[in-house]
Amino acid sequence: MRLGRISYVNMAPVFYRLEYEVDEVVGVPTELNRMLLDGEVDVAPISSIAYARNAEQLRLLPRLCVSSEGAVDSIQLVTRLPLGRVRTIAITPESATSVVLTKVLLPHAEHVAIEEEADAKLLIGDAALKSAFEDPTPHHDLGRLWLERTGLPMVFAVWAAPEELADQLADLEHALVASVRLARSEPERLATEASERYGYPAGFLARYFEKLRYSFGPRERAGFYTFLEMARDVGELDHVPELRFTRSEVRA
């Protein structure tokens, strides 16, 4: 099984003790979006908006996502201006969901390439963590802004596979969920090992992992639907698709 892995530290709990034989394929979210659709990986965590735009080809693993209920730390809008005065945003090419979320939250701001001058800059993943750690410029956490707007969790990524593989994924999903649960039960070891791999202080990572959610429960699904509806309303999605899951949804 060719399993996509986002290259950021947020994947550490999911792969903490994954007891399933896979070939890991590492990339940023937009790379994994493309690779899944092109058949270069079998299963991957992909941008939430990428699933919505290609839902007719894909099935979701029903027990897994990457979300937060409030601040997430690794998705930041960096600007010295009040948000109401931001008119241009330099966006990262690494994320699709965060770019659309920025448009949902600041619909009047124009998006430009990351290397261009702009009122604000969108950073995600490890670049956002590093910036928040080192740069004194005000940082606005998109997870927090989303919660203030909607009162719901924000689902940044979902786990998806081509429809033809839907019946073959129950054991893999079970192994991924088990890895997350074990990571949650050993937070100090998780933070120490992730610190060694990614270079951040263990205490910083321990606090970061507490903010991440991986279970795709009713509140997360409500937040996901709300995001898709708002993405449609700002012209980033033609319609809100049905969420179609693999058969592993029946597994306890």
Image (cartoon, rainbow, N blue to C red):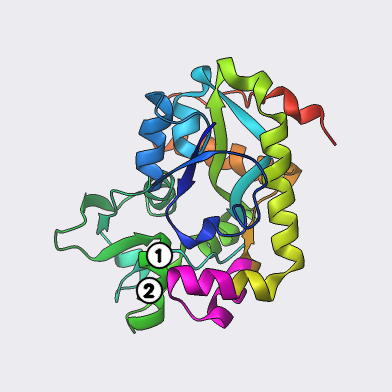
- 233 sits left or right of 241 in the view: left
Give, as a single range, the part of the protein colored magenta.
192-209
For mark 1, what is the residue? 126
**Percent position (x, y) of residue 23?**
49, 39
Q: Was residue 51 drawn as part of the magenta stretch in this picture?
A: no
For mark 2, what is the residue? 130
Give yes or no for contact between labels 2 and 1 (Cβ–Cβ under 8 Å).
Answer: yes
Which residue extends farthest front? 21
**Percent position (x, y) of residue 140?**
43, 69
Taking 171 as reference, is 180 above or below it? below
Taking 167 as reference, is 20 above or below it? below
- 32 sits left or right of 204 in the view: left
Q: Quadrant of the N terminus?
A: top right
Q: The residue under label 1 is which amino acid type?
A: Asp
Question: Judging from the image, what secondary structure is the residue with disc 1 in?
Answer: helix
Taking the spot 46% from the left edge, 64% from the top edge, the residue there is: 74
